[in-house]
């Protein structure tokens, strides 16, 4: 982890097996999740404290960081807001992470395992934890799973329980809030019946650390890096900002489509190709990478632009010097 000075502990709680807690974590504060006794999977949800619809999207985390989470990984919210809610500062190698497995639920145990009653599960645990803040079971989203040693095969088949949990007593995950958030960790409810937690339940410790000059500066740098784009929208930008209260869907008879950039304006552009260019065009067509010359030129130009403009397969990272962090902490900002 970057050698920054953290603030004092302002909140601490031991979460017992099959429980969870929704805790506000303010911008620049640090959240720690620690294994108290040994291997234990932890499910994690996260919401913007000022707009609960602005919530964690593990799908977009996969888009930018792959199937595993690492120090520097951004906990992105879903578009159209697409905000960095938190950033992972540190985790031990024994904390294998999962953003494929969603969360366990009671139906899974009934349908797949044949359990006749209501088994503990993360959907219900998360729903109970967020109920303290007026949220409903429908507001639970797919989890970022810490200490969940899952896998997948070459065909893309998800393998949930093939490996034992590698967590150790004292293992700690550390995250910094880049927005004011409601963080919701829970002790995974499937641990007694799978390798998810090695067939047993164990408690976890949750701490929130106050802001320090260093964490304020780091949060400022992260916000500068990941926020400020004009297409990171707020409710004020929505054509329909209302939150539905009716469950059934009915058509709005006054609806008129207003799709982005529709209708498209397509212009012809003449490009002169020399013999070398034409050989490249024929090569692309022969390789099945283009249907005709027009397709070859268009695809070739856009592929070149995308690969040279967009960083390819480079994971998010904490590329900040401690001096930069401390300079940012002394600069007035949106603290």
Image (spheres, helix red, strand yellow):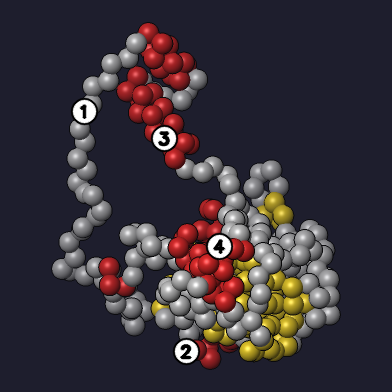
Compare marks 4 and 2 and give the one earlier in the sequence: 2
Residue 324 is tagged as 4
Q: Are marks 1 and 2 in contact (CB under 8 Å)?
A: no
Closest to the camera, between mark 1 and mark 2, is: 1
Residue 134 is tagged as 2
Q: Are marks 4 and 2 in contact (CB under 8 Å)?
A: no
Residue 27 is tagged as none
Q: What is the total number of numbered labels drawn onto the structure image?
A: 4
* Residue at the spot of label 3: 305
Q: Secondary structure at mark 3?
A: helix
Closest to the camera, between mark 3 and mark 1, is: 3
- Residue 231 higher or lower than 188, as above or below: above
| Residue 278 percent location from the top left of the image | 38, 12
Question: Can the viewer see residue 216?
Answer: yes
Q: Which quadrant would the N terminus be assigned to in this image?
A: bottom right
* Residue at the spot of label 1: 268
- Residue 278 higher or lower than 215, as above or below: above
Q: Secondary structure at mark 1?
A: loop
């Amino acid at each position: 982890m970057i050698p920054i000075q953290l603030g004092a502990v302002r909140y601490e709680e031991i979460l017992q097996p099959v429980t969870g807690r929704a805790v506000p974590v303010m911008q620049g504060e640090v959240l720690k999740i620690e294994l108290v006794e040994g291997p234990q999977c932890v499910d994690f949800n996260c919401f913007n404290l000022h707009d609960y619809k602005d919530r964690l999207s593990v799908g977009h985390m996969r888009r930018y960081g792959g199937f595993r989470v690492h120090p520097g990984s951004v906990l992105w919210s879903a578009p159209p807001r697409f905000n960095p809610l938190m950033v992972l500062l540190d985790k031990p190698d024994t904390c294998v992470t999962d953003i494929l497995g969603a969360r366990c639920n009671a139906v899974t145990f009934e349908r797949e395992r044949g359990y006749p009653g209501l088994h503990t599960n993360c959907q219900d645990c998360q729903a109970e934890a967020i109920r303290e803040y007026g949220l409903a079971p429908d507001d639970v989203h797919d989890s970022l799973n810490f200490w969940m040693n899952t896998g997948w095969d070459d065909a893309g088949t998800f393998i949930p329980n093939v490996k034992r949990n590698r967590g150790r007593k004292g293992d700690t995950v550390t995250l910094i809030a880049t927005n004011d958030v409601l963080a919701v960790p829970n002790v995974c409810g499937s641990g007694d019946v799978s390798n998810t937690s090695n067939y047993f339940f164990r408690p976890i410790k949750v701490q929130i650390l106050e802001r320090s000059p260093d964490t304020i500066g780091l949060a400022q740098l992260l916000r500068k890096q990941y926020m400020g784009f004009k297409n990171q929208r707020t409710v004020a930008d929505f054509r329909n900002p209302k939150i539905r209260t009716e469950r059934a869907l009915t058509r709005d008879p006054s609806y008129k489509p207003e799709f982005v950039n529709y209708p498209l304006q397509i212009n012809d552009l003449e490009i002169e190709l020399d013999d070398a260019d034409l050989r490249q065009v024929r090569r692309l067509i022969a390789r099945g990478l283009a249907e005709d010359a027009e397709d070859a030129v268009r695809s070739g130009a856009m592929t070149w632009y995308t690969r040279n403009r967009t960083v390819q397969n480079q994971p998010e990272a904490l590329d900040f010097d401690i001096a930069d962090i401390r300079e940012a902490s002394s600069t007035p900002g949106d603290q």
